[in-house]
Amino acid sequence: MPLPKENEQYTYADYLTWPEDERWEIIDGIAYMMTAPTWQHQAISRELNRQISNYLFDKPCKSFAAPFDLRIPEFNERDEETTTIVQPDLVVICNKEGLKGTGFYGIPTIIIEILSPSTARKDKILKFSRYQRAGIQEYWMVSPEYEQIEVYTLQENKRYELSKIYTIEDKLITSLFPDLEIDLKPVFTF
């Protein structure tokens, strides 16, 4: 099977034909190859997922870590026609009906991306815009370099607003789960 080309438009049906040993994302039909994350990236992801999963243990929402195929529909197209397939570092799903195959088809509640030099631009611009347009309630951008997390919350005008910047000394509290407190010291200390 030929590999994706720049400036071509792709769907989830195309994505499913690509080699399984390669990691790809498609944002608005454009394919982006992904590289392996650093160990620091993995450590941050593991600790965030541990704290969130422990909190959600007996609740209807669940968290999932990459690799996880999140298919975000634009105009209620069928799953295989979706033109945005991303691999968020962490995602919180409260609608289990969209869980199928290798991930989720629909709109998750929270997406968490851990920034790295190779993905920061895509996470801050392309994904930010796509997640906002999709109506994802919260988008967290984690900066390992600055040991901080920016939490963006979708407002009534369907635009993200920076709710707060949390640092290593803080406990992150989200309005979506007010009794969840994420201790950031172990997130950034390994």
Image (cartoon, rainbow, N blue to C red):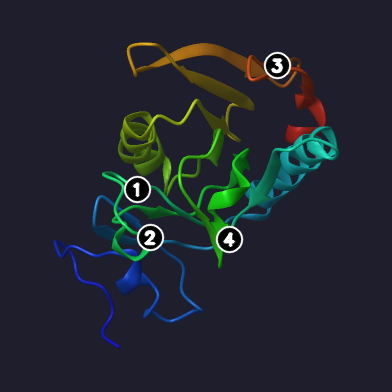
Q: Residue at x 59, y 25 (%)?
A: 149
Label 3 Cα crowd, 10 Å radius (few <14 / some 14-19 / many 20+): some
Q: Earlier in the sequence, mark 2 or mark 3?
A: 2
Q: Earlier in the sequence, mark 2 or mark 1?
A: 1
Q: Position of residue 83 (x, y in %)?
A: 28, 56
Distance of mark 3 from mark 1, alpha carbons?
Answer: 29 Å
Distance of mark 2 from mark 1, alpha carbons?
Answer: 7 Å
**Residue positioned most to the bottom:** 1
Give the answer, above or below, for where 183 lies relative to 69: above
Closer to the observer: label 2 or label 3? 2
Label 3 SS:
strand
Between 59 and 9, which is closer to the camera in this rendering? 59
Label 2 SS:
helix
The amino acid at mark 4 is Pro
Q: Earlier in the sequence, mark 3 or mark 1?
A: 1
Pointer 3 and pointer 1: residues touching (CB < 8 Å)?
A: no
Q: Position of residue 164 (x, y in %)?
A: 56, 11
Distance of mark 3 from mark 4, alpha carbons?
Answer: 25 Å
The amino acid at mark 1 is Pro
* Image quarter of residue 63: top right
Closer to the observer: label 1 or label 4? 1
Q: Position of residue 73 (x, y in %)?
A: 34, 48
Q: Earlier in the sequence, mark 3 or mark 4?
A: 4
Q: Earlier in the sequence, mark 1 or mark 4?
A: 4
Residue 79, which numbered label?
2
Residue under label 4, please give it. 67
Pointer 2 and pointer 1: residues touching (CB < 8 Å)?
A: yes
Question: Is 94 placed left or right of 160 in the picture?
Answer: right
Question: Is 157 placed left or right of 69 in the picture?
Answer: left
Label 4 Cα crowd, 10 Å radius (few <14 / some 14-19 / many 20+): some
Q: Residue at x 26, y 44 (%)?
A: 75
Residue under label 1, please give it. 73
